Amino acid sequence: MTPDTLRQWRRDLHRLPEAAWCEFRTSSLIAHHLSKLGFEVMLGDKLLASNLIMGREVDVQAQKERALRQGAHPDWLARIEEITGVMGVWDSGRPGPTLAFRFDIDAVEVDESQDELHPPSQEGWQSRNAGWMHACAHDGHTAIGLVLAERIAALADRLNGRIKLFFQPAEEGCRGGKALAAGGQLDDVDALLALHIGIHANSGELVVNPTEFLCSTKFDVEFLGRAAHAGLEPNAGSNALAAACTATTAMLGIARHRDGMTRINVGQLSGGSGRNVIPGHARLQGETRGATPALNDYMFGQVQQIVEGAAMMQGATYLIRKQGEAIGIENSPALLEEIVPLAKALKLETIHTRRFGASEDAGFLIERVQRNGGQAAYLILGANLAAPHHHPEFDFDETVLEHGVALLESWLLSRLGT
């Protein structure tokens, strides 16, 4: 493993970020790389439970055409039907447990900074896809997974059992994890690790038991009213935009719950067609969060009641669509006991716990493995940051990529090494 390889992968992915469910170039390159190394490759269409896919509105043909222009592997791109994401399986041919790793691959809807002091802009590897940026380190996560695959192939003679590498689409908005967990490929996994770069931890640190992962529901609401002339006969109209505005204000005023942290946000609101037309259509996008499933259910239940009432006030109808979902995460204690000495041997400072304070759909994968009798954990790989996650000037200390590969390889050898 060389630092240059990690940087090259990370910067290539950073330069051409792809949105959730649009990761066709990324998936094709991952599949090609894994196949070259000798992994059995499974693509998203056969990997995910299609009935649980959320928040997916994709022009597949247009996205594939762009991916091809931007250097996707043509053969693997052609094999991807509709759904992105990749799993690579390494089978040693010898008995032993099945270990799994999860890496998320999608980008964030952020315009990257063009400031000359921003290293990607300064060095020429800033985002080329306007409006999208790897501002949450998923480019780094993917690079770690690709180089870990190289290490697995190099260690083939020393390994027992099986290894599954999951490259998950659509983590942003918590849209892909539930479908991946339900796809069946985790059901034989004895232990799973997932990680995230740089949340509440600095370079050289590893948080082994982050807490306060928020359960979340992402939702869209459509209000359907009746358009009419705003001057001649406003009484004939049904103002969908007024309903959406009423709902937005009421949602933001939902009483927070005494039993724990609750959150709500409405991030987009649109509607209408002109100043002199009663709006016949409006749409809002929002999310609820809660420290527990019950608290998130309380918030989303309030949303549903508010939407119904706001629509009724204006004589409109409505449709609520769930666009993403996340549950909490509880790491397996026995697995953490394995990780701590391995991290210390690599000179990483281990921090037992820190608050995560956001949502992560890896929780569905972790729950699936644990429910089937396996162990699973989510780790925070510390990194010094140039700016916070989801910020136009986000960047991280790339030396931590080596820490990530070394830690995962060390754990893998401790479990599967001969």
Image: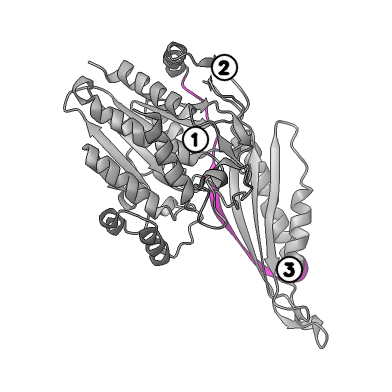
User: Disc 3 and disc 1: Cα gap in Å?
Assistant: 36 Å
Few, some or many C-alpha atoms within 10 Å of disc 1 (few <14, some 14-19, many ≥20)?
many
Percent of width and height locating residue 383:
55, 28
- Looking at the image, the residue that sits furthest to the left is 93
Percent of width and height locating residue 171:
49, 44
Q: Earlier in the sequence, mark 2 or mark 3?
A: 3
Q: How is the image coloured?
A: one colour
Q: Quadrant of residue 215?
A: top right
At 82% from the left and 88% from the top, the residue drawn is 232
Few, some or many C-alpha atoms within 10 Å of disc 3 (few <14, some 14-19, many ≥20)?
many
SS assignment at label 1: helix
Q: Earlier in the sequence, mark 3 or mark 1?
A: 3
Q: Is residue 83 above or below residue 363?
A: below
Q: Which residue is mark 3?
A: 241
Percent of width and height locating residue 110:
60, 51
Residue 317: say if magenta: yes
Q: Which mark is residue 363?
A: 1
At 70% from the left and 58% from the top, the residue drawn is 307
**Magenta stretch in the rendered image:** 313-332
Q: Which residue is mark 2?
A: 351
The amino acid type of the residue labelled 2 equals Ile
Q: Quadrant of residue 408?
A: top left
Q: Which mark is residue 114?
A: none
Percent of width and height locating residue 368:
41, 34
